Image (tube, helix red, strand yellow):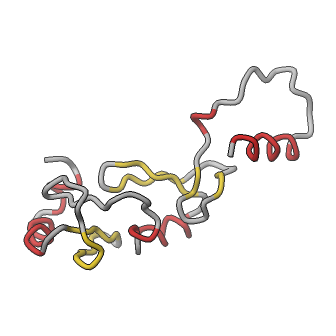
Amino acid sequence: MLFILIITIFNNFSGDFSGVNKISVDSVYICPVENEVIMSEPIKLEYTGKIYYFCCSGCEMLFKKEPARYIQKDLMCLPCSDYDAKREIYFIYDEVKYYFCSRSCAEKFRKVPEKYLNGK
C-alpha cells in the first residue's frame, strides 16, 4: 500500500524534493467505502467510538446509511459496549444507522441516544 502511495506522489509531483524530509505514514487514510488512499483533505466521522475518514461526502453518506457494509470487524452495541451487535437489530438516529445485540439495547439507545453517543 505504501508503495502505491509513493508511486502516486511521484507521478503527481512536478517539482523537486529539496525541502522534503520524510513522508508520514500516519497521515495516510483509506476511505472505507472506496477502499482507496484519500488524496485530498479527508472528511472525518466518529462512529461508535472510532474515527473513520472519507474521500468525499458521498462516501460518508453511504457509510452512514449502512455502516455494517464497510466495517470489517464486529459491530459495536453502544449500550453494553460489546462487539456483539447484529445487523438485523438497528435504529437510525440523525441519519446514521446504529446496531445492537438485542431489542432491549436498541430500546435503551432509542430513549436517550445522546447518552451513548456522548459517553456514559
Q: Residue 118 appears at what percent x and percent y?
A: 22, 50
**Residue 38 horizontal side relative to residue 18, left or right:** left
Q: Who's the residue at 78% across and 40% down the image?
A: 6
Task: Look at the picture and state if 56 lies above or below 53.
Answer: below
**Residue in view at x 70 percent, y 30 percent:** 23
* Most foreground residue, 36 or 16: 36
Horizontal arrangement in the rendering, residue 82 relative to residue 52 (left or right):
left
Q: Is residue 23 above or below residue 117?
A: above
Which quadrant of the view contains residue 97?
Answer: bottom left
- Report x, y in % for residue 24: 64, 30
Q: Residue at x 26, y 69 (%)?
A: 99
Residue 76 position within the rendered picture, expressed as x and y whole percent measured from the top left:
27, 58
Question: Could you tell whether 85 is left or right of 35 in the image?
Answer: left
Q: Position of residue 58 (x, y in %)?
A: 56, 70
Q: Quadrant of residue 95?
A: bottom left
Task: Report which quarter residue 91 is drawn in.
Answer: bottom left
Query: Residue, x 57% and y 34% (percent of image)?
Result: 26
